[in-house]
Image (cartoon, rainbow, N blue to C red):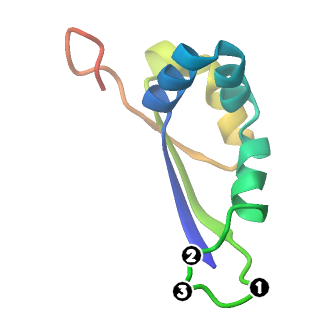
Amino acid sequence: MKSALFVDFDNVYSALHSLDPVVAERFAFQPSNWMRWLTDSLMAPPHAPDEAARRLLVRRCYLNPQVYQRFRPSFNRAGFEIIDCPPMTSKGKT
């Protein structure tokens, strides 16, 4: 099953960090681990053929390079295209 994965890094990381900083760091530094769960363990939708394997054909991560640059190498190693989203507001929203 062909799939695309788009990660809004700033929002996912911030939400995880407010719940559990350790989990947020794991998400940020070990994307291959949770991606393996997505491809190997996540149930396929009802319309997918039996035994369909999920393949991530597109992997994009949108992040603010001024705040989250230290996580960029982890996502690059996991095969993500990184899209820089610098802040556009005075409150730092991208």
State the residue lying farthest toward the bottom.
49
Tell me the element at label 1: loop
Q: Tell me how far mark 1 sits from mark 2, CA to CA.
A: 11 Å
Mark sitting earlier along the chain (1/2):
2
Tell me the element at label 3: loop
Q: Are marks 2 and 3 in contact (CB under 8 Å)?
A: yes
20, 7: nearer the viewer: 20
Q: Tell me how far mark 2 sits from mark 3, CA to CA.
A: 6 Å
Q: Position of residue 43 (x, y in %)?
A: 67, 68
Q: Is residue 60 above or below residue 66?
A: below
Q: Name the quadrant containing residue 59.
A: bottom right
Density class for disc 2 (Cα within 10 Å; few <14, some 14-19, many ≥20) is few
Density class for disc 3 (Cα within 10 Å; few <14, some 14-19, many ≥20) is few
Q: Position of residue 74 (x, y in %)?
A: 71, 32
Residue of label 2: 45
Tell me the element at label 2: loop
Q: Amino acid at mark 2?
A: Pro
Residue of label 1: 51
Q: Position of residue 6 (x, y in %)?
A: 49, 51
Q: Is residue 66 above or below residue 16?
A: above
Looking at the image, residue 52 sits to the left or right of residue 81; the answer is right
76, 45: nearer the viewer: 45
Residue at image coords 77%, 44%: 32
The numbered dot on residue 47 is 3
Q: Amino acid at mark 3?
A: His
